[in-house]
Amino acid sequence: MSTDTLDLPPLRDDLFTTEPFALIGSACPQGHVSFPARDFCPRCYTDDVHTVELPQDGTIESFTTVHQAPPGFTVPYQLGFVRLDGPVVLLSRLQFPPGLSPQIGQQVQLAADKTTIDGQPHLSFAFVPKEQS
């Protein structure tokens, strides 16, 4: 995505930061990490939590192609469960170049994305194939 995408209003204020672009989660003293960030730990129920920046790399555990969606969404698009390098698995949009399909076990990385809600563009996130170095 272009840097202009980062200037869009965020889909939600509590999902990510823009400088640097990173997902925001929460963690408790027991080491449980959640996404999105929460006021309490959903595993041990403590309210002693703090926000953390989540890893930007992960692995596709499962995915599907959506062919029917609510009004305003362009189909088809792909959703996948991504296990971040760490304890978090999240559901995210997958953005792959034309002609490439996601694969279970494939390495992906976080990217800024644009989504449209009620005709208005918003900054969101997706996972893209990880660049191999």
Image (cartoon, rainbow, N blue to C red):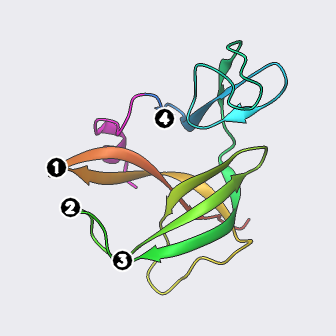
Number of marks: 4
Residue assigned mark 3: 76
Distance in Å between CA atoms under marks 4 and 2:
21 Å
What range of the chain is rendered magenta?
1-13
Please tell me whether mark 3 sits on a helix, a strand or a loop.
loop
Dot 2: element: loop
Label 4, on which residue?
Answer: 15
Circle 1 residue: 118
Tag 1 or tag 4, which sits nearer the N-term? 4
Q: Amino acid at mark 1?
A: Asp
Q: Which comes sooner in the sequence, label 2 or label 1?
A: 2
Residue drawn 58% across and 25% down?
38
Instruction: Name the amino acid, label 4.
Output: Leu
x and y, in percent, of residue 6 in the image: 37, 41
Q: With respect to residue 17, does 103 lie above or below?
A: below
Q: Residue at x 49, y 31 (%)?
A: 17
Q: Is residue 111 magenta?
A: no
Numbered badge on residue 72: 2
Assess whether mark 3 and mark 1 are in contact (beta carbons under 8 angstroms): no
Image location (x, y in percent) of residue 77:
40, 72
> In screen coordinates, is 114 left or right of 108?
left
The residues tagged by marks 2 and 3 sit, at their Cα atoms, a distance apart of 12 Å
Q: Residues within 10 Å of mark 1 (few under 14, many from 20)?
A: few
Rate crowding at label 2 as few (under 14), some (14 to 19) or many (20 or more) other CA atoms within 10 Å.
Answer: few
- Asked if the residue under mark 1 is in contact with the one under mark 2, i.e. CB atoms within 8 Å, the reply is yes
Q: Is residue 110 left or right of residue 30?
A: left
Cα separation between marks 4 and 1:
20 Å
Q: Residues within 10 Å of mark 4 (few under 14, many from 20)?
A: some
Whether residue 8 is in magenta: the answer is yes
Q: Where is residue 131 shown, x and y percent of the image? A: 65, 65
The quarter of the displayed image where residue 82 is located: bottom right
